Amino acid sequence: MTELLQIQEPGRVKLPAPQWAAFLELGFRPLYLAGCFWAAVSVALWVFAPVMLRGQLAGVIWHAHEMLWGFIATIAVGFLLTAGANWTGINPLKGKALGVLSVLWVTARAAYLIPGTTSFWVAVASELVFFMGAAIALGRAIYGTRSQRNYGVPLLVLALGVADALFLLAAWQGDYVRLMQHFNTGLLCMGVIALLVARRVIPFFAMRAVPGLSIPMHTHSGHWQLAASGLAIGSGLLGWSEATALFLTVAGVIAVVQVLAWKPGAVWRVPLLWILYVGYAALGAGLLVAAAHAAGAVLRAAWPAHVIGVAGFSVLIIGMVTRTALGHLGRPLRTDRLIVCCYGLVIAAAALRLLALLPTGLALAALHASASAWVLAFALYLWRFFPMLIRPRIDAAPVLRPDKIAVRSNPPQ
């Protein structure tokens, strides 16, 4: 007679099937995937297949635009739509509305690659509605609940969209000087968002992860930093180089001092934390490089953009899209070798990209190595997180109780 043996072991989680409702539940799900996918694809196109870039935007202009507004700003919007739900208790965008926003993003990315005037204006319209829709959704949640601490967030997203519109208009008119001015405005608007978010979440994450760690918030210095960043944007728009350099220096110095105040020695064994520290420190250094460039230092114009964008924003992004995704998906807040490998690859890509800016015979090899490390990093992220992001939270999945798990003593042959 066949017996049933009870297996006394912890319950096993049965992973649910992918669900559209889960995928469109919060902004980080589609937009983290979209942004990271485009980070890999756009750099691969730019470095290894530039002949495929036949759209209205010239090659280097397309690359600059897609890295800032197609990748970095997309991740920021995904984060803010998700964080907005925590700040206000109201999910700013979900379901069909979030799906429409995602379709607008996809339309813009595809249309910029298609030759012709019509496709260009379709891309422009789709992208600007994307930023406007995100700003309106955030504004309804934040202003509707009178979350005064976050009143500036929808305006910053709107400013990103306005800088984008001015950049695209200058590109259409062939005005390179204005184009670079508006790119720098967009870069600094994104910098303000990154400074605002990082100053809030990094101490919070660190104190939760490291027992006994106490980090002061330094709220007043944060206000000074945001004010200096805003004044740097205004001075840049007015063409006041000396004032721009001064305000960028203030913002950069505060960022570097802030990292030291966050006690980096206490987090070096926690990859989910030290990657954020490295990114924030690089962002501070990038602001100082931008200050030196504004003051007239002999630097290529590409230096501020790549130190801020690749070493700063991108390192912060790979840390945020892992840490926040794990948290919102109900997963354990710990890394594995693949995630740490992603961190190392993005840092290596940033270092090699800066090496490629130097006037040496290694520039081309460094550029190709940087692009390869970059593409691999984001491909690995997608390979690991795509299955998670299209499914419900892990703690929402049904658990098979140990007393319900049984095997036959004489299993069939």
Image (cartoon, grey):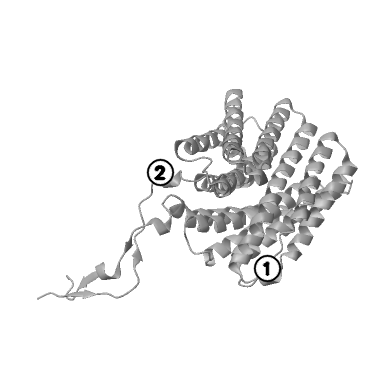
Answer yes or no: is residue 361 visible: no
Which residue does the image show at 63% across and 65% down from the upper left? 206
Dot 2 crowding, Cα within 10 Å, few <14, some 14–19, many 20+ = some
Point out residue 401 in the picture as x, y percentages from the top left corner.
30, 67
User: Which residue is outermost to the left?
Assistant: 1
Which amino acid, mark 2?
Trp
Q: Nearer the viewer, residue 39 or 312?
A: 312
Q: Describe the element under mark 2 as helix, strand or loop.
A: helix
* Whole-percent x, y for residue 348 in the image: 66, 60
Residue 20 image label: 2
Q: Position of residue 159 (x, y in %)?
A: 69, 36
User: Which residue extends farthest top?
Assistant: 118
Task: List x then y, in percent, for residue 32.
Answer: 54, 48
**Quadrant of the drawing holding the N terminus:** bottom left
Does residue 250 lie above or below 215 as drawn? above
Q: CA distance from mark 2 to mark 1?
A: 40 Å
Is disc 1 surrounded by few (<14), some (14 to 19) or many (20+) residues within 10 Å? some
Q: Which mark is residue 214?
A: 1
Quarter holding the C terminus is bottom left
Please indicate, yes or no, whether residue 122 appears anywhere in the rendered image: yes
| Residue situated in front as seen by the camera: 354 or 282 | 282
